[in-house]
């Protein structure tokens, strides 16, 4: 019986979180004020303009991770893949598999909380936001590269770059190449994140 209501409960939870994000975004947008830069030119502050795209993206990432991480890792344990990779008797065994799998799970959980913290910093207009945002964007690119290298070392016959890794690397690099310069050069960012 619970399995019949689970999709409904997940949908309601998703809609509730989406509603909170929309309400918070509207509240923050209404706080749009005019500030001055160091050269005394008026610049709008607040989460508006291009920052709206950043806010929407940051709001959706924890939600996507919340639903995607169990889909990625639960089958690993349920279908016997974990035992196949970590059992000494297996032909796919490597002593580092156990460590690498748990490290990847831990890193993804840490990133989940980093994105929640980034949302908090964004909506409180904290001065730490642009710095942590930039570090996170670059860290994700680095983690994708390190992940590809690690799996190539553990599975020497596998290609270094498969379609999923190339797609993830291109997306993360494009994201960083657009939003890192924006965080560094935008006058709105400079006058908004001052708390």
Image (cartoon, rainbow, N blue to C red):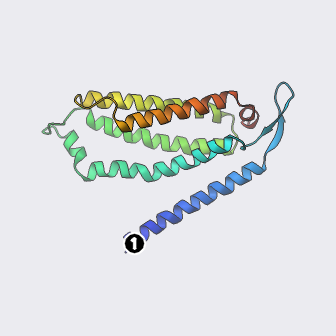
Q: Is 35 placed left or right of 101 in the picture?
A: right
Question: Quarter of the image containing the N terminus?
Answer: bottom left
Residue 162 is at least partly visible in this image: yes
Q: Estimate how packed mark 1 is, as few (under 14), some (14 to 19) or many (20 or more) residues with alpha carbons within 10 Å.
A: few
On screen, residue 131 above or below 52: above
Label 1: which secondary element = helix
Counting from the top left corner in percent of width and height, residue 134 is at 58, 31
Quarter assignment of residue 131 = top right
Q: Which residue is mark 1?
A: 4
The residue lying at 66 percent from left, 27 percent from top is 184
The residue lying at 44 percent from left, 53 percent from top is 67
Residue with the most extreme left position: 89
Counting from the top left corner in percent of width and height, residue 127 is at 69, 34
The residue lying at 74 percent from left, 35 percent from top is 188
On screen, residue 22 above or below 168: below
Residue 120 is at least partly visible in this image: no
The residue lying at 33 percent from left, 34 percent from top is 162
Quarter assignment of residue 175 = top right
Counting from the top left corner in percent of width and height, residue 18 is at 59, 57
């Amino acid at each position: 019986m619970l399995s019949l209501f689970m999709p409904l409960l997940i949908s309601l939870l998703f809609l509730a979180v989406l509603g909170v994000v929309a309400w918070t975004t509207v509240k923050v947008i209404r706080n749009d004020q005019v500030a001055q830069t160091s050269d005394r030119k008026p610049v709008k502050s607040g989460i508006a303009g291009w920052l709206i795209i950043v806010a929407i993206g940051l709001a959706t990432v924890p939600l996507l991770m919340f639903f995607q991480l169990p889909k990625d890792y639960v089958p690993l344990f349920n279908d016997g893949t974990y035992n196949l990779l970590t059992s000494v008797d297996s032909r796919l065994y490597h002593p580092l598999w156990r460590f690498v799998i748990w490290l990847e799970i831990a890193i993804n959980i840490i990133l989940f909380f980093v994105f929640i913290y980034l949302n908090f910093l964004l909506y409180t207009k904290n001065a730490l936001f642009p710095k942590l945002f930039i570090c996170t964007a670059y860290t994700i690119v680095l983690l994708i590269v390190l992940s590809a290298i690690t799996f190539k070392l553990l599975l020497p016959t596998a290609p270094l770059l498969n379609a999923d890794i190339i797609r993830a690397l291109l997306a993360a690099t494009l994201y960083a190449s657009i939003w890192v310069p924006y965080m560094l050069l935008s006058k709105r960012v400079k006058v908004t994140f001052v708390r």
